[in-house]
Amino acid sequence: MEQLKGLILSGGKGTRLQPITFTSAKQLVPVANRPVLFYGIDAMASAGIKEIGIIIAPETGDEIREMVGSGEQFGVNVTFIEQDQPAGLAHAVLTAEEFLGTDPFVMYLGDNLLQGGISDLVEAFRSSSPDALILLTPVSDPENYGVAELDGDRVISLQEKPPEPKTNLALVGVYMFTAGIHDAARAIEPSARGELEITDAIQYLVDEGKRVEPHVVQGWWKDTGRLEDMLEANRLVLDTVERRLDGELIDSTCEGRVIVEAGAILERSTVRGPAVIGAGARLIDAYVGPYSAIGERCVVERAEVENSILLEGSSVTDLNARVESSLLGRDVTIARSDGQPSAYRFLVGDRSDIGVV
């Protein structure tokens, strides 16, 4: 099989992570202080894929271009492809047809995380040369996903978010295709939600007698579209970190697998891993508990944080309760006010959830 290209989908509105995604692309929200999108690029680079196209939306494309650059930092060449509207995954394939040409390719959803990368899957695709290879994983709520029905080692049907799923095998956000997928994407009609569904395009391949192979994923897979998923992905990635203390510790302790980046300063503070403290962050009289990712230039002072993600420049100060299971955007300030009488004062984005205990 000839050289594989990569296609990463990084458009989409990220409505389930609002208000964070009002000001930033969902694929750039960090997990363990690294944008989700970067994990997908890393996975492709590790699998030997050097030519990568990234589908971007007009609204968030500039930010993604700036963060990713030419791809040199990952050891790959990146081409940006603008999709004028989020009209479905199969539409994204057609949008990228000029870049992909007749080459086989791996398609990766930019807000997904897959344990162990894709090297084994690329090897399986190369060695057996099917028309398509799809990744599947058992889930407890298949009605929320594309679902596959199998006959041995062949896919016989696919349905997008079926009300009564035939199996519990959901499509993971990684696909491998030969160039035949372009004709399949042209042959299908938009779904009820007005999109060209990749499940319909793969079903077209099946109906045409093409060989579509399933690969059931053994490790974890995460679609980071919601807060709970972001926090879970953060936990899973932090579980793999190695202890590294490059910052300055003053009367402070770091227990277990903790990363303190160069330029971070901890004073009279305790960090219990797994956790990561970003460059330039300051922890003063603070406690940071397991599964926390404190971004660059964050401040945690006279406060406690656990199982949370703080994006760069945020500060949490003078709280007499612990911040937990939270995701704070860039340059957010949370502090106790001295005003009387006791009251909560919030400035909050649209469609937010706030729990006060």
Image: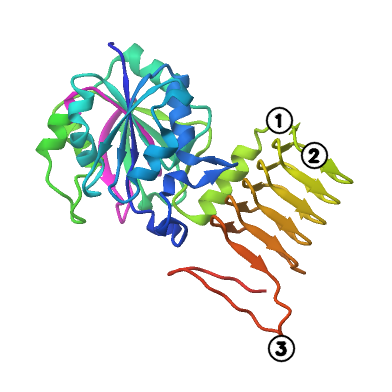
In the figure, residue 1 lies in which quadrant? top left
Q: What residue does disc 1 label? A: 242
Q: Whole-Å distance between the Cαs marked 2 and 3?
A: 39 Å
* Badge nearest the viewer, 1 or 2: 2
Q: Is residue 215 left or right of residue 234?
A: left
Which amino acid lies under the numbered mark 2 shown in the image of this protein?
Glu
Q: Is residue 315 above or below residue 76?
A: below
- Could you tell me the amino acid type at mark 1? Glu
Dot 1 falls on a residue whose secondary structure is loop
Label 1 crowding class (10 Å Cα cut-off): few <14, some 14-19, many 20+? few
Label located before the other in sequence (1 or 3): 1
Assess whether residue 161 is covered by the magenta stretch: yes
Q: Earlier in the sequence, mark 1 or mark 2?
A: 1
- Name which residue type carries label 3: Pro
Q: Which mark is residue 29?
A: none
The residue segment tinted magenta is 153-181
Q: Is residue 79 above or below residue 284?
A: above
Instruction: Estimate how packed mark 3 is, as few (under 14), some (14 to 19) or many (20 or more) residues with alpha carbons within 10 Å.
Output: few
Residue 68 x %, y %? 42, 34
Which of the image's four quarters has the C terminus?
bottom right
Q: Is residue 240 left or right of residue 252?
A: left
Task: Give how far apart the Cα atoms at labels 1 and 3 are.
Answer: 46 Å
Magenta span contains residue 186? no
- Kindly identify the residue that appears in the image at 46 percent across and 44 percent down: 28
208 to 122, vertically: above or below? below
Q: Of marks 2 and 3, which one's residue comes earlier in the chain?
A: 2
* Residue 324 showing in the rendered view: no
Mark 2 lies on residue: 248
Q: Is residue 209 visible?
A: yes
How many numbered badges does the structure rendering display?
Answer: 3
Q: Nearer the viewer, residue 200 or 150?
A: 200
